[in-house]
Amino acid sequence: MHLVSHDLYSAIRTTRRLVHVSSLVTHSYRLVISDKLDNERIENARTGAWHVLVERVIDEAYSPIAALILLNHRLIGDPIAVNSIKLPWTDSGITKTVDIGSIAIFDEEHFEHAPIEAFHLAWDAALAKERVKVMDVGVVCKTGIGDGAYRVDTVAGEGGWVVGIQIDFASDTSDEWGKQFTKQVAERRGASARA
């Protein structure tokens, strides 16, 4: 059974190419988006397996960086299907301010009985080696070009359950770096759509 209606599985091509990184499992109905300094919560998140995908772009140093991170619940379907379907993304009302150049999305239940400091240490160790890392409790990701304010969009399935979350790191145009990065990513997405 799919939570998102089948008419969404049309032949519409999106303007981005997403890479499936891994999957994670959640147990509570609340996911937390954090930059260690403060947290935002996604309520009514569907429990179970979530696929983690990123849109990678190459910076001037030829290093892949994440332009977007997306989590879609397994009930949406094949994780790579989001490259070829148009999902009904809506603004969640959350703009996540990032002040440490990275972000995490995790299941809040994991920290009811364990200190979050241990997760923060694992977060730092993971991002010292990789730009995106899926761990037992969630996913950590470096945020595009660093600090900024990024809009969080969601997809709601049957019953209003959240089955998709995306954070576009090419959405902050509050300074010159953000404007330049947003322009570069928009050009890349446009070229990808024409291909």
Image (cartoon, helix red, strand yellow):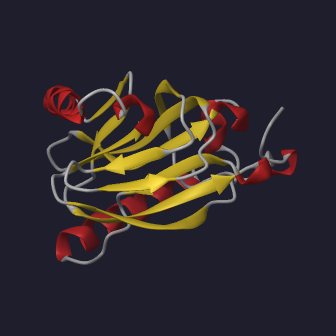
Q: Is residue 105 above or below residue 148?
A: above
The residue drawn where x is 48% and y is 34% is 52
Q: Which residue is farthest top?
A: 136
The percent coordinates of residue 135 (x first, y second) are: 35, 24
Picture quadrant of residue 121: top left
The residue drawn where x is 71% and y is 38% is 76
The percent coordinates of residue 154 (x first, y second) are: 58, 56
* Drawn side of residue 45 relative to residue 10, left or right: left
In what quadrant of the picture does the N terminus appear? top right
* Drawn side of residue 195 relative to residue 38, left or right: right
Q: Is residue 56 above or below residue 133?
A: below
The residue drawn where x is 44% and y is 33% is 109
Residue 190 or 151: which is nearer the viewer? 151
Q: Is residue 151 above or below residue 132?
A: below
Residue 52 or 122: which is nearer the viewer? 122
The percent coordinates of residue 36 (x first, y second) are: 21, 48
Is residue 194 visible to us here?
Answer: no
The percent coordinates of residue 46 (x first, y second) are: 63, 40
* Drawn side of residue 80 relative to residue 52, left or right: right
Q: Which residue is farthest front?
A: 113
Is residue 119 visible to us here?
Answer: yes
| Total count of labels | 0
The residue drawn where x is 27% and y is 73% is 179
Residue 60 or 23: which is nearer the viewer? 23
* Drawn side of residue 4 relative to residue 59, left or right: right
